[in-house]
Amino acid sequence: MAAAYIFVGIRHFLDPDFFLAIMPNYLPYHLEAVYVSGGFEILLGGMMLFEKSRWLGGWGLIALLIAVFPANLYLAQNIAAQEALNISQTAAIGRLPFQVLFIGLAYWHSKP
């Protein structure tokens, strides 16, 4: 799990356009938000590697997953975002419940 978050966090810096495509219009500072969320994914994913920081890293990931959920909702509702990511609306909607699974995994992994 830690490696997955670190990998995706790095992708925020290497391919920010991918993440910019799903930024809701009502949020300001799109590029900055992509970089900040990527930085937190790297940091919190790294924290999951160490027992002493795992609890805080897990709860940080839970907060991050909740914070980025509007982008996933936007993807499910916006045809332009779906086209930019080459994903169908059905697939975009199908991704939404996985946020609950990821929150559950972060919680499970946060336990000492």
Image (spheres, rainbow, N blue to C red):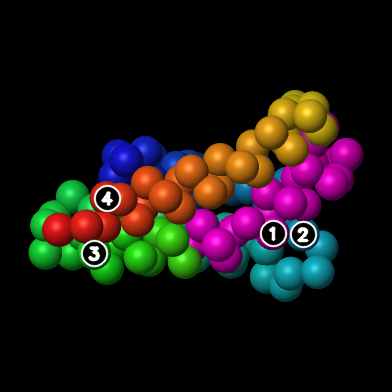
The magenta region covers: 64-84
Q: Earlier in the sequence, mark 2 or mark 3?
A: 2
CA gap, disc 4 and disc 2 = 30 Å
Q: Are marks 4 and 2 in contact (CB under 8 Å)?
A: no
Residue 35 x/y as whole percent: 51, 60
CA gap, disc 3 and disc 4 = 8 Å
Q: Are marks 3 and 4 in contact (CB under 8 Å)?
A: no
From the viewer's perspective, tell me whether residue 47 is left or right of residue 32: left
Residue 61 visible in the displayed image: yes
Quarter residue 1 falls in: top left
Q: Nearer the viewer, residue 8 or 65?
A: 65
CA gap, disc 1 and disc 4 = 24 Å
Q: Are marks 1 and 2 in contact (CB under 8 Å)?
A: yes
Q: Nearer the viewer, residue 31 or 53?
A: 53
Q: Quadrant of the C terminus?
A: bottom left
Give the residue pinned by disc 4. 109
